[in-house]
Amino acid sequence: MKRLSALIVMALVLGAVIVGGCITGPETGTTETGAPSRGPPEDRGYAQRTGQEMSSPMGTVDVSTLPVENLSPDEVEGILYMREEEKLARDVYLTLYNATGLRVFENIARSEQTHMDAVLSLIEKYNLADPAEDKGIGEFTNPEIQALYDQLVSRGETSDIEALKVGALIEEVDIKDLEEWLSRTDNEDIKLVFESLMAGSKNHLKAFTRVLANSYGVEYSPQVLSEEEYRSIVGS
């Protein structure tokens, strides 16, 4: 599936956000950071607090209570793709937390780990090969997702505002992808997991855009979702 690649690349090109045309991968490792804050000191309190209440892990998703169903090729692709797409979000946020020190990234990265675990429960239930197995931070099986990780981190490391916009963009694409995958499945366990992921992504989108508005005075404009759908999410 090419949606993530196509939508993010389009947004990056339209925003002219890859600094100097250079794509570089950051160092990986622990989320603790001693990096200095780059935002206005008087504005950073909200940015440090927000995300805790908006990104709390979704409730436990127990797919074992639902019957094992036959998987279509689309359903297999969707499960494996969303495992790495959720890893992309987690890894970008961990890396940008190291770069910015903004607590919202640390909080939402924890939530993305629960999303990864929920998709893993489907992989294990259906005995699929996990594309994220033994992969470190910033390492992916899918080469397109690997390239996008590098591009998004390169953009986000330029400033706190760009980092937050990267977060919002990832959540927009996540929502759009999940909408499409849901339209291509009739399995109850997949729908349960993907609907939970979407609810989390909507909360994350609200968290990132709220920090942009309250800490930096920046009104985020949707890059993937329609204006109507975006407003219905952030206004809920």
Image: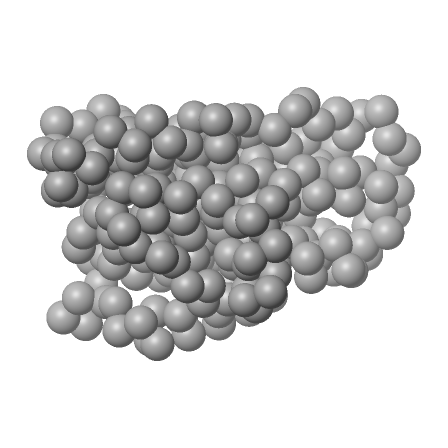
The answer, for residue 131, to whether it is visible in the render is no
Asked where in the image residue 191 lies, by quadrant, the reply is top right
79 relative position to 113: left or right: right
10 relative position to 58: left or right: left
Rendered position, 186 above or below 21: above
Rendering colour mode: one colour
> Residue 205 location in percent, x, y?
48, 47
The answer, for residue 10, to whether it is visible in the render is yes
Depth check, front residue: 198 or 144: 198
Which image quarter holds the C terminus?
top right
12 relative position to 191: left or right: left
Q: Residue at (23%, 67%) from the top-left corner?
A: 18
Depth check, front residue: 43 or 138: 43
> Residue 13 location in percent, x, y?
33, 75
Which image quarter holds the N terminus?
bottom right
> Residue 91 location in percent, x, y?
37, 41
Depth check, front residue: 221 or 124: 221
Asked where in the image residue 14 lies, by quadrant, the reply is bottom left
Rendered position, 21 above or below 83: below
Q: Residue at (17%, 66%) from the top-left corner?
A: 19
Asked where in the image residue 49 lies, by quadrant, the reply is top left
Rendered position, 86 above or below 101: below
> Residue 84 location in percent, x, y?
51, 47
